[in-house]
Image: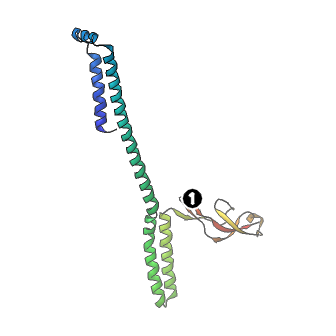
């Protein structure tokens, strides 16, 4: 409700209160008695028509306001879906830059341990960025098989009774993002 509508409603309330508080004078009472009853019905009908017109106007304004809100919300949601990954991609770009430099240096590098160390640094940087985004690897070391986190791609005889129903090997690391599995870990399960 806008300020004009609020002022209009307050003005109507105060006018009604003033009319109720005022006592009619003898002349007004006499004048009321002289007027035919049809006039008061006509006045009531006119007042009702004014109220209906006012309510229709307010209803149309509320409908238009809601329609604008709905359109704005749909637009914001669409923009969020289209640009939601912008933050993630922006944070990964430095890793891409490092990879490009490493590939260029590998062509002329003679010191293999130094190249390996550089690639490990890039890997750690990438893992750190993923952790800041809420991405974590699913730990499969000596873990019980859990269908919510693991995908069994093979079953092998367990080397011991303790390893039955446990993960023996992980062939593809799984990941969670904010405690939601985004990729199941592919594992070999002992039977």
Q: Is residue 125 above or below residue 63?
A: below
Q: Is residue 26 above or below residue 179?
A: above
Visible residue check, residue 178: yes
Circle 1 residues within 10 Å: few <14, some 14–19, many ≥20 = few
Q: Position of residue 131 (x, y in %)?
A: 50, 65
Judging depth in this view, the residue of 161 and 104 nearest the camera is 104
Q: Is residue 19 above or below residue 123?
A: above
Q: Position of residue 191 (x, y in %)?
A: 77, 66
**Image check: 5 left or right of 107?**
left
Q: Residue shown at 31%/34% (left/top)?
A: 6
Q: Quadrant of the N terminus?
A: top left
Q: Position of residue 101 (x, y in %)?
A: 44, 82
Q: Residue shown at 77%/64% (left/top)?
A: 161
**Figure quadrant of residue 159:** bottom right
**Image check: 131 left or right of 59?**
right
Judging depth in this view, the residue of 44 and 82 nearest the camera is 44
Visible residue check, residue 140: no
Q: Residue shown at 33%/16% (left/top)?
A: 38
**Figure quadrant of residue 164:** bottom right
Judging depth in this view, the residue of 113 and 96 nearest the camera is 96
Q: Position of residue 3 (x, y in %)?
A: 29, 38
Q: Secondary structure at mark 1?
A: strand
**Figure quadrant of residue 146:** bottom right
Q: Residue beneath label 1, please?
A: 180
């Amino acid at each position: 409700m806008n300020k004009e509508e609020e002022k209009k409603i307050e003005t109507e309330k105060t006018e009604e209160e003033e009319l109720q508080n005022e006592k009619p004078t003898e002349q007004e009472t006499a004048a009321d008695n002289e007027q035919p009853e049809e006039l008061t019905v006509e006045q009531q009908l006119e007042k009702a028509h004014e109220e209906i017109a006012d309510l229709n106007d307010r209803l149309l304004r509320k409908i238009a306001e809601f329609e604008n809100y709905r359109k704005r919300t749909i637009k914001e949601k669409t923009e969020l879906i289209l640009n939601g990954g912008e933050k993630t991609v922006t944070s990964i770009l430095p890793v891409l830059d490092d990879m490009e430099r490493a590939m260029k240096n590998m062509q002329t590098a003679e010191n293999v341990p130094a190249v390996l160390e550089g690639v490990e640094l890039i890997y750690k940087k990438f893992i750190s960025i993923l952790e800041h985004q809420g991405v974590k690897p699913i730990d499969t070391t000596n873990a019980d098989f859990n269908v919510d986190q693991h995908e069994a791609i093979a079953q092998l005889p367990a080397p011991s009774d303790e390893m039955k129903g446990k993960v023996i090997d992980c062939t593809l690391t799984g990941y969670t993002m904010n405690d939601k599995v985004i990729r199941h870990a592919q594992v070999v399960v002992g039977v």
